[in-house]
Amino acid sequence: MKLSGFELPKWLQLVSNRYGIGINLHDISGVSQIDESMAEAFAPYLYHNNAFCNYLKKFEKTYNDCARNKDILCWMCNKHDSPFYGTCYMGVGEIRYPVRWNGRLIAFLCVGQFYTDLDRSLQVLGAGIDKYELDAKEASRRYLSVSKPLPAEYEEIVLQIGLLSEYISLHYGKFLSMSKNGLSMEEAAESHKCNYIVNRTLSYIHDNYQNQLTLKVLAGNCYCSEPYLSTLFKTKVGTTVIEYINSYRVAKAKELLDVTVLPITVIAFRCGFGDSNYFSRVFRRVVGLSPREYRQRKQ
């Protein structure tokens, strides 16, 4: 489905290029996945893809705090009905746009990266550099390469992105009305949201099983609480989040045991287990054999 007169991707690119701004959609209810045109349009805008944010995501502590910052943003957007300006924990300023459908927060847009007081922003950045023991020269260079003063066209940008927010909301409502299948609109919205959260969690696990995964990080990635994700995942998938992660990691470990001669300790770490003894216990529980026994049986 297209916006009358021009396609959504072209609009996003036009606004981004015209004002030299980054646009990110933080999807809470699966609005980016309601049809192929929306998925295609928002694919490049679903995360903060810039030199500074990508640098921060390289480190575990800053990566986790970026996820926690999403939780805070979601909470703040729930409290606002109109656009508002704010900064992240590392001093990057953005205009935030809550996207609502029937009063319910379904997404929020972040537009940036800005500063209103460069000296103050650099103080925040400096505190973060010290806290996370980052390379001061590299972090500062990247921050300055992506941040700019809040544009004089602030009101114009607010209007443009506000129209985009309205379009997303209308498009979402139209999708629900076409796909409710006997459900009320609210029930259809909840069902779509639940499926989206579970699929998003599964995809995140598959892409990041080699790294440290916690329920807190997974819940932050979906803008929901840990108890909500835990209960929903068990209901939809039939196993707990931790059990699924371990089973997926064991499946990947079996592949390495089958086709490589890597030491079992190395395989354990490559598959996201921080302790080889814990890996062996989990592997035996899932497979019925120890990693060594499994490898010997395959030879």
Image (spheres, helix red, strand yellow):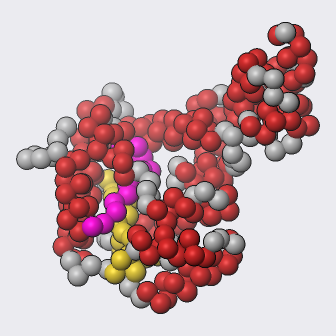
Q: Is residue 112 left or right of residue 291?
A: left
Q: Is residue 95 visible?
A: yes
Q: Is residue 11 left or right of residue 200?
A: left
Q: Relative to the observer, which residue lies in front, 277 or 105?
A: 277
**Position of the C terminus by quadrant:** top right
Q: Is residue 8 left or right of residue 192?
A: left
Q: Is residue 98 visible?
A: no
Q: Residue at x 33, y 47 (%)?
A: 42
> How many numbered circles are shown?
0
Q: Is residue 14 magenta?
A: no
- The correct choice, above or below, for 59 with respect to 265 in the image is below
Image location (x, y in percent) of residue 7: 17, 45
Image location (x, y in percent) of residue 12: 24, 54
Which quarter of the picture shows residue 297? top right
Q: Residue at x 59, y 82 (%)?
A: 126
Q: Residue at x 19, y 57 (%)?
A: 14
- The correct choice, above or below, for 131 with respect to 188 in the image is below
**What span is colored magenta in the figure?**
20-32
Q: Residue at x 82, y 19 (%)?
A: 287
Q: Relative to the observer, which residue lies in front, 154 or 186?
A: 154
**Position of the N terminus by quadrant:** top left
Image location (x, y in percent) of residue 194: 49, 39
Which quarter of the picture shows residue 162? bottom left
Q: Is residue 30 magenta?
A: yes
- The correct choice, above or below, for 70 with respect to 144 in the image is above
Image location (x, y in percent) of residue 41: 28, 44
- The correct choice, above or below, for 195 with respect to 166 in the image is above
